[in-house]
Amino acid sequence: MTVIALLSVAPVVEGSMAGEVAKAVDALDEFEVEYETNPMGTVIEAESIEELMAAATAAHTAVDGDRVSTFLKIDDKRTRSQRADEKVDAVERALGRPARSDPE
């Protein structure tokens, strides 16, 4: 996979957005992408920019509301294929430890 993105889609509302965010995440299943949701958004991996943009558009459209806020940050590595977990692995190798705080 060569295109990696961070996608955040949310209605502009007071209270919980979980139900609407779930609709956005669910919409990604209609596309040939891999994804992982975290507290700040969803990391998406796709073979092409076209597939990534189609998935992001579907996620945005799936959210109901008078106002929907979408953030999309794209890393389109064109010279070689690199998966999202490989990027994290490289940082952890440089750190010499996991890239997270010690909970103790």
Image: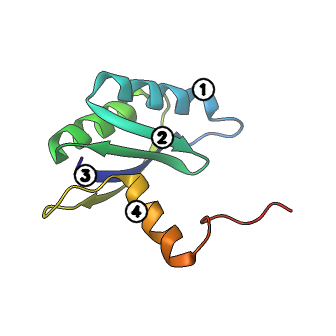
The residue type indicated by label 4 comes to: Lys
Element at label 3:
strand
Nearest to viewer (mark 1 / mark 2): 2
Image marks 1 and 3: residues in contact by CB distance under 8 Å: no
At numbered mark 4, what does the secondary structure look like: helix, strand or loop? helix
Quickly name the residue at label 4: 87
Viewer-closest of 12 and 50: 50
Q: Is residue 14 above or below residue 103?
A: above
SS class, disc 2: strand
Looking at the image, tell me whether mark 4 or mark 1 is earlier in sequence order.
1
Q: Give the camera-side residue of 62 and 53.
A: 53
Mark 2 crowdedness (10 Å alpha carbons): few <14, some 14-19, many ≥20: few
Between marks 3 and 2, how big is the CA–CA gap?
14 Å
Q: Residues within 10 Å of mark 1 (few under 14, many from 20)?
A: few
Q: Amino acid at mark 2?
A: Glu
Please give the residue where the numbered disc 3 appears in the rendered image: 3
Mark 3 or mark 2, which has the lower sequence index? 3
The residue lying at 56 percent from left, 76 percent from top is 95
Q: Residue furthest left?
A: 79
x and y percentages locating residue 77 in the rendered image:
21, 62
First in sequence, mark 1 or 2: give its number.
Answer: 1
| Residue bearing the label numbered 1 | 19
Q: Amino acid at mark 3?
A: Val
Q: Quadrant of residue 56?
A: top left
Instruction: Work out how far the residue at label 1 is from the one at label 2, CA to CA, in angstroms.
Output: 17 Å
CA gap, disc 4 and disc 1: 30 Å
